[in-house]
Image: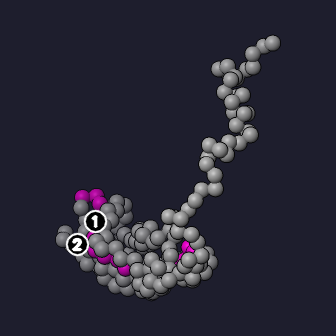
Amino acid sequence: MMLPLISLSDLPPEGRQFSGEIRPDLFGLPGLYDPLFVPPLKYDLTVRRDDGDVIVEGSLSARFSLQCSHCPARLLWQVRIDPYFSCEEQEDDTLDLTAQVREDILLTLPGYPRCEESNVEPQPCQTEGAFAPESEFVPLADEAAMESPRADIWKALDQLPPGGAPPAS
């Protein structure tokens, strides 16, 4: 299932409104840890022509189940793009916005979601307190004190003349 095909030759000069819901999964992400689409995707878009381009404005919303980046729990995430804007080249007489809308929605999802960051039902993460906060981080050793024995190799290479050939003896 996809968004309705838009016939550009039938568009009035002021544009046309397209609204609806899509329940079948148009995201098709197969991985175990990939976001899972929770239907429906709702759209309310106005499509109009502007010279050789097609302007799409309106709003999109969809819900996903995401894998927490710290624990095995899944969390809900609501994507709302309002206002939505897209400018498409007018190549054919019909326009299919499915791929563009799919990409725009997926790009808004967080890269490393956490249970407590859910914008639908925030909850404490199962790993809460299992890791030291950044403010308590103490480096293992001073970097200058951890000079590698291999550093001498670099010093030797730095002494080579330009061109890399060792001096003749």
Name the residue: 56% across, 77% down. Answer: 129
Figure check: 22 above or below 168: below
Main SS category, magenta section: strand
Q: Which residues are magenta?
A: 51-70
Using residue 58 as the reference point, say whether residue 124 is left or right of it: right
Could you tell me the amino acid type at mark 2? Gly
Residue 141: x percent and y percent? 63, 52
Q: Is residue 93 above or below residue 33?
A: above
* Dot placed on the residue nearer the N-terminal end, 1 or 2: 2
Q: Is residue 24 magenta?
A: no
Outermost residue, top side: 169
Numbered badge on residue 55: 1
Q: Is residue 15 visible?
A: yes
Residue 27 percent across, percent down from the top left = 50, 76
Given residues 125 and 22, the one toward you in this image is: 125
The answer to whether marks 1 and 2 mark residues whose Cβ atoms lie closer than 8 Å is yes
Residue 119, label in figure: none
Residue 143 sits above or below residue 110 on the image: above
**Place of residue 119 in the rendered image (x, y in percent of width and height, measured from the top left):** 40, 80
Residue 4 seen in the current view: no
